[in-house]
Image (spheres, rainbow, N blue to C red):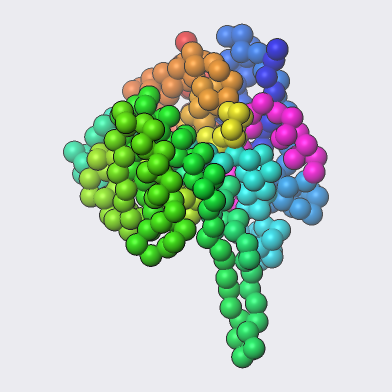
């Protein structure tokens, strides 16, 4: 039976990079027998402009029916003045929570061809391969109470709540251990257990799951130290598992180790393996419409989709091989450009990937 994929281009460079990823999907469908149906819907600022809200019911209905989702990016200056409750980002957060996409996988892999693009010395990042497992539907992003209230003194006070139940910690920890088993067999759990009770519980539950996995080496690290270690000696990490907000911050940091945030895909999965796939970079309004965005993170997100939600690992391999080949051939978008390489735009990069698929 054919699998249905919902395409959510979003805002900024979203439509440009998603168009290239769709070309890749269409090529796999037309030339290699990938059995898929593609549908498209509005989310984020694009949805606000068309319907008044960042996550229209029509989009959510299609999202619930789809086997997998491909999202570009949401947000931009145009919508920044809106109330936080109806901003483009709420569309993304609404999809994550409505679809129960609690497990966010963010690989940070250094392509050897791009070693020069990293801001760290080549020997520190050569061979880097970290998987950040970020809890995505809980923690301070979703905790209640939240808001801005007025105190008796008349002063305003902002407040959010960091909250994790044992079951939420349990399930994300299991995801991390399962992934570690298929790679370097090490999990580092990142918390702030020296200060926050919530993450004291986090540490306790992760340790308990760790005891069920004696073949995986578990360590714990405070988040401030983890940020430092990521830039000091990132290769000490295999799988990192952490809360929603710590994961947000550490994954940007890890991404930059690889030279370009424009290269990194992500998967957000529910308990059944249904997923939303998106590049980890944002909507980059400064370069939107210029045709210079790097579509590789989105194209690599398609590879993750094929592997994690559509059970098509051989198709995923085809995409990843094509990316490797195009980088070997010296093609570079401006964000990863270096001496003696050939600079190309978004569309030319997408075309080159399609041509390189074997
Ligand atoms: C991310 C982004 C989002 C987040 C924003 C756009 C809401 O930064 O996916 O990392 O904070 O989760
Ligand atoms: Mg982020």
How many numbered discs? 0
Q: Identify the residue at horizontal 37%, vertical 43% (top origin).
A: 207
Query: Hey, which residue is sitting farthest left in the picture?
Result: 123
Q: Nearer the viewer, residue 286 or 202?
A: 202
At which x and y percent is residue 144?
63, 62
Please tell me in which quadrant of the rendered image residue 329 appears.
top left
At which x and y percent is residue 278?
55, 37
At which x and y percent is residue 40?
72, 32
At which x and y percent is residue 200?
41, 56
Q: Is residue 305 above or below residue 54?
A: above
Please tell me in which quadrant of the rendered image residue 223 appears.
bottom left
Residue 126 horizontal side relative to residue 287, left or right? left
Residue 189 horizontal side relative to residue 198, left or right? left
Q: Identify the residue at horizontal 74%, vertical 30% (top origin).
A: 65
Q: Nearer the viewer, residue 27 or 201?
A: 201
Q: Quadrant of the N terminus?
A: top right
Span colored in magenta: 57-76
């Amino acid at each position: 039976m054919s699998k249905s994929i919902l395409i959510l281009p979003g805002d900024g460079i979203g439509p440009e990079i998603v168009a290239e990823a769709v070309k890749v999907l269409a090529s796999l469908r037309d030339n290699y027998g990938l059995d898929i149906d593609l549908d498209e819907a509005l989310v984020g600022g694009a949805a606000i402009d068309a319907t008044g809200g960042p996550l229209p019911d029509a989009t959510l209905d299609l999202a619930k029916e789809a086997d997998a989702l491909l999202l570009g990016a949401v947000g931009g200056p145009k919508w920044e003045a809106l109330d936080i409750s109806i901003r483009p980002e709420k569309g993304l957060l609404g999809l994550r929570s409505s679809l129960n996409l609690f497990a966010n996988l963010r690989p940070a892999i250094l392509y050897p061809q791009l070693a020069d693009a990293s801001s760290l010395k080549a020997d520190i990042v050569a061979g880097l391969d970290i998987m950040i497992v970020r809890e995505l539907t809980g923690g301070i992003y979703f905790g209640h109470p939240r808001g801005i209230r007025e105190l008796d003194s008349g002063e305003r006070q902002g407040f959010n709540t960091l909250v994790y139940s044992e079951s939420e910690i349990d399930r994300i920890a299991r995801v991390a251990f399962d992934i570690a088993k298929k790679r370097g067999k090490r999990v580092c759990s990142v918390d702030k257990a020296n200060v926050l009770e919530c993450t004291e519980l986090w540490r306790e539950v992760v340790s308990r799951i760790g005891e069920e996995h004696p073949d995986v080496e578990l360590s714990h690290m405070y988040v401030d130290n983890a940020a430092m270690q990521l830039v000091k000696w990132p290769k000490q990490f295999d799988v990192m598992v952490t809360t929603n907000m710590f994961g947000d911050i550490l994954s940007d940091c890890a991404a930059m180790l690889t030279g370009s945030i424009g290269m990194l895909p992500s998967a957000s999965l529910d308990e059944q393996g249904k997923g939303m796939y998106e590049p980890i970079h944002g909507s980059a309004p400064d370069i939107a419409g210029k045709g210079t965005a790097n579509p590789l993170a989105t194209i690599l997100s398609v590879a993750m989709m094929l592997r994690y939600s559509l059970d098509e690992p051989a198709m995923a391999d085809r995409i990843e091989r094509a990316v490797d080949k195009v980088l070997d051939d010296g093609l570079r978008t401006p964000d990863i450009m270096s001496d003696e390489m050939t600079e190309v735009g978004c569309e030319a990069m997408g075309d080159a990937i399609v041509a390189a698929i074997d």
